[in-house]
Image (cartoon, rainbow, N blue to C red):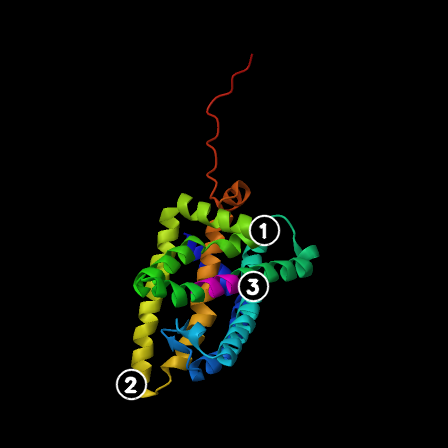
Amino acid sequence: MVFRESLKQYLENYKTVLGFALLLVFVLFFVLSQNFFVSSGSIFADFNIIKSGAIDVALALIAIAIFEFFYSILITLIVFAVRKNMSKVRVQYYLSEKIQKFSFKLFIFFFSFTIVALALQAFLPLAGIPIAVVNLIILIASLLLIFFPQAAVIDESGIRSSIISSIEFFMAHLKESAQIIIAGALMLIVLGIVEFALDQVFFAGNFITPLISLVFIIPFLEIVKSVIYMHKFELVKSVHKEIKPKAAPTSVNVN
């Protein structure tokens, strides 16, 4: 039911979804950079990036910041679109100012999380902590925070409140959270297979799979999360719930 509703929202917002393709401009930079690599439609940073020269680190952080700035705008637009479609409250009148506010909030969160993650990967191994353990910690933190965009845009909460709301919502809806994680993992596995197959023939897997990831996987999963998050409101539940007609009375009691 949720995935069917999410697919409907995806198709209704195809113009916003196609906007994610603009982020492909950054893929070429990340592919050519020695501090990044692209695999299964995802961009990964080398955990030794902080140990590179000052200029390399600065260029990498600037590229990440610009990428995440536009990424934040697109995520805000897609979450806001789902919120608008599923809510009976009209929100168009403050759309422009809210989009700017939400986008900046998401950008601050994404960029701060990236900096913290890179710092942990660079310095915790120096303290004797295996890099696998560090990556596991980062993975768990990122999973607990998967509903941050929804909390920030739908609840209109601040960064700290959105972090708390994301963790609380994740823990309170473990079944739905697990479904999102499993669906995302399966998509990435399929994408990895597609990339391998394309590289055997066209040697273009690193360019085609990011396109698939940007115009389908990322926006679709954000829509799924938004649909699930919106269903916590009783008003939305009642609107989307099929109402069964009440049976007609068989007799009338007249006093």
Q: Mark 1 Cα within 10 Å, few/some/many (few <14, many 20+)?
A: some
Bounds of the magenta segment? 110-117
- Amino acid on which the number 2 mark rests in the picture: Gln
The reply to whether the magenta stretch includes residue 174 is no
Observer able to see residue 86: no
- Residue 158, numbered label: 1
In the rendered image, the vertical position of residue 49 relative to residue 156, given as above or below: below
Other residues around mark 3 within 10 Å, as few (<14) / some (14–19) / many (≥20):
many
Instruction: Estimate how packed mark 2 is, as few (under 14), some (14 to 19) or many (20 or more) residues with alpha carbons within 10 Å.
Output: few
Numbered tag placed on residue 200 in the rendering: 2
Residue 125 location in percent, x, y?
Answer: 34, 65
Q: Main secondary structure of the magenta part?
A: helix
Dot 3 and dot 1 residues touching (CB under 8 Å): no
Q: Say which element carries label 3.
A: helix
User: Marks 1 and 2, how far apart in space?
Assistant: 47 Å
Q: Amino acid at mark 3?
A: Phe
For label 3, the residue is: 107
Query: Which element carries disc 2, helix, strand or loop?
Result: helix
Q: In the drawing, does residue 198 fall left or right of residue 118?
A: left
Which residue occupies 50% across, 51% down? 163
Query: Image height check: is 43 above or below 233?
Result: below
Looking at the image, the residue that sits furthest to the front is 127
Q: Earlier in the sequence, mark 3 or mark 1?
A: 3
**Mark 1–mark 2 contact, CB under 8 Å?**
no
Compared with residue 12, is residue 20 higher up or lower down, i.e. above or below? below
Q: Viewed as shown, does residue 255 lie left or right of 251?
A: right
x and y, in percent, of residue 222 in the image: 47, 60
Viewport quadrant of the C terminus: top right
Nearest to the eye among marks 1 and 2: give it.
1
Q: Disc 1 residue type?
A: Gly
Measured as percent of width and height from the top left, residue 164 is found at 49, 47
